[in-house]
Amino acid sequence: MSHFFAYMNRMRFINRWALMRNSYTENIQEHSHQVAVLAHALAVIRNRCFGGCVDEGTVSVAALYHDAPEILTGDMPTPIKYYNPQIRDSYKQVEQVACDKLLHMLPRELQPDYEAALRPADPAVEELVKAADKLSAHIKCLEELKAGNGEFRAAAEQTRQALERMDLPEVKYFCDNFLGSFSLTLDEME
């Protein structure tokens, strides 16, 4: 019996932003869905507006699974995960062990397909998933600020700067055309 999908189902129990006071909780299952939607959008924008040729479906699937190792490791807060290169590299190794464990829960004939989802080989796919992940974090900050939660002010600035440093035209396009709506109320969007 394979436990892979039962483990995937447990993504909803791993909350993000553990060090912050949140106006609403966000789990990695919700986050992964949002990252998949955003990664797909970035792939479409890259392909349609900037001459890219990335597979939009591959990007979306990689985004759906990008935090799957956290089912086993938990969500390590960003300030700790990236405190220094040694911690960052060690945590990457822990994530690889978690990926291995998840993959070995699958029947052998399915493992190559899910390895491609958990460990995308295409650097363009990884780049877009990473950008979508950071964009999702920034959107969370904007929504928290909109709810009056000043706890996210510094994180909003840090995530905005990180997005700018990526210097990706599809991210700039998304921010210029769509990001402002996340700071509006439902009535203001009409």
Image: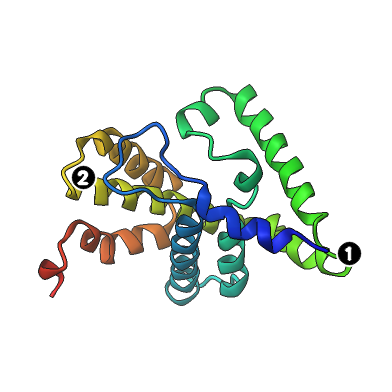
Residue at image coords 18%, 48%: 147
Residue at image coords 42%, 62%: 170
Q: What secondary structure is marked by label 2?
A: helix
Residue at image coords 54%, 70%: 52
Q: Is residue 113 visible?
A: yes
Q: Which residue is mark 2?
A: 145
Where is residue 160 drawn, in percent x and y? Answer: 33, 44
Q: What secondary structure is marked by label 1?
A: helix
Q: Which residue is mark 1?
A: 108
Q: Residues within 10 Å of mark 1 (few under 14, many from 20)?
A: few
The count of marks equals 2
Return the disc, 2 or 1, that comes first in the chain's sequence: 1
In the picture provided, is 59 more to the left or to the right than 50? right
In the picture provided, is 110 more to the left or to the right than 130? right
In the picture provided, is 53 more to the left or to the right than 149? right
Vertical arrangement, residue 75 with respect to residue 1, above or below: above
Residue at image coords 50%, 64%: 36
Vertical arrangement, residue 177 with respect to residue 157, above or below: below
**Labels 2 & 1 near each other (Cβ < 8 A):** no
Where is residue 89 drawn, in percent x and y? Answer: 66, 30
Quadrant in which residue 186 is drawn: bottom left
Vertical arrangement, residue 91 with respect to residue 22, above or below: above
Where is residue 122 drawn, in percent x and y? Answer: 68, 60
Q: Which mark is residue 180?
A: none
Q: Residues within 10 Å of mark 2 (few under 14, many from 20)?
A: some
Q: Residue furthest front?
A: 1
Cα distance in 3D space between marks 2 and 1: 46 Å
Q: Quadrant of the N terminus?
A: bottom right
Tell me the amino acid under the disc marked 1: Arg
Tell me the amino acid under the disc marked 2: Leu
Mark in the foreground, 2 or 1:
1
Where is residue 142 drawn, in percent x and y? Answer: 26, 49
